[in-house]
Image (tube, grey):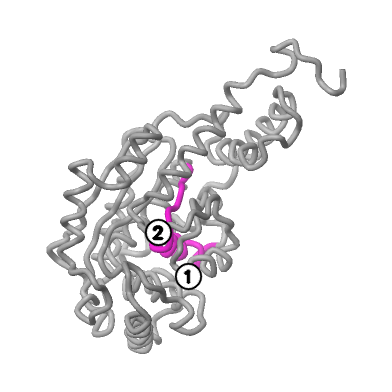
Amino acid sequence: MTTAMPFDDFRELINTMPGPDTGAAQRVAERDQQLTKPPGALGKLEEIAVWLATWTGRPPQVIRPQVTIFAGNHGVTAQGISPFPSEVTAQMVGNFSAGGAAINQICAVNDLGLKVFDLALEMPTNDITQEAAMDERTCAATMAFGMEAITGGIDLLCIGEMGIGNTTIASAIFLALFGGDAEEWVGPGTGHDEKGVKLKAQVIQRAIDLHKDHLRDPLEVLRRLGGREIAAMTGAILAARMQRVPVIVDGFVASAAAAVLYAADATALDHCLFAHVSAEPAHKKALAQMNKVALLDLGMRLGEGTGAALAAGIVKAAAKCHSGMATFEEASVSNRDD
């Protein structure tokens, strides 16, 4: 970081984000009209092909897709908001590394790279009902670390997370950014019953009450209510925009990281595709607040990038259909105007 306040560099990046390449988008749309199919016959796949061109500036292709999982622990678990202990976060990171998780299988099927980042699991963030989750320097450094997710020449970034207690954190972020009542933003997470969901809402409201005088700035919302994995995902999404790498956002928790950027600039997520509607009840509400429509609705709520990895297979298919299909002229097939 080069400025006096750690967040200043990120604010400058948000203010200077590159826009869409409309020329590339137009070229893809025009070629699409010449492919050996009726116009619009591939539906959403055609829109995805144009989206890829819009944000990469080149014909649609996905050669080096990567799923990146960020893992973090949360001090707020001391309030009893999860039926699982925090140790499960590290245990699942080990499971990812050993190839035993759902995300490993989906990545294998769709030929996706996978990286997992352990974000100081032995040092949970502070309990947000007692103090800010992170100081500004820690939050900014974690965002900067997340920006490393796009290194290595990847051309599609799928973000996911792992962190016991992070649905509570995500709900608190959504409440702070979009308003409403705590009850509107909570759900069962990893398996809470009605009593547990009510406890989560109470904990979130206590956190909001504590920090309420400091929640006008989205980056302050992130550092006060967020977690390391959410800060890292926010940084990754922003870095991808700066480098023209399209992003697929996973579910409820990953969407909270995206929402921080949306609250700072409503165009900040134009290079993002939202993978699926989580079974976590408030996710649909969050997507509506950001004017986004998810690609899939499979009743999933696992996290760990699984929805994003499934969506990546569809994005790869969209790119291949556009680049691999012959035009009517190339295939010597009569077009409807012939």
Residue type highlighted by circle 2: Ala
Q: In the drawing, does residue 308 fall left or right of residue 268?
A: left
The quarter of the picture where the C terminus appears is top right
Q: Residue furthest front?
A: 193
Residue 78 percent across, percent down from the top left: 19, 79
Displayed quadrant of residue 26: top right
Point out the frontmost of discs 1 and 2.
1
Residue depicted at x 57% and y 28%: 59
**Residue 137 badge:** none
Residue 317 percent across, percent down from the top left: 53, 32
Above/below status of 96 relative to 219: above
**Residue 254 badge:** 2
Displayed quadrant of residue 214: bottom left
In this rendered view, identify the residue nearer to me: 235 or 201.
201
- Which stretch appears magenta? 246-265
Above/below status of 261 relative to 30: below
Residue depicted at x 33% and y 36%: 113
The majority secondary structure of the magenta stretch comes to helix
The residue identified by callout 1 is: 281
In this rendered view, identify the residue nearer to me: 43 or 180.
43
Residue 192 visible in the current orientation: yes
The quarter of the picture where the N terminus appears is bottom left
Q: Does residue 247 show up magenta in the picture? A: yes
Residue depicted at x 21% and y 70%: 125
Q: Does residue 263 show up magenta in the picture? A: yes
Q: In the drawing, does residue 324 fall left or right of residue 10?
A: right
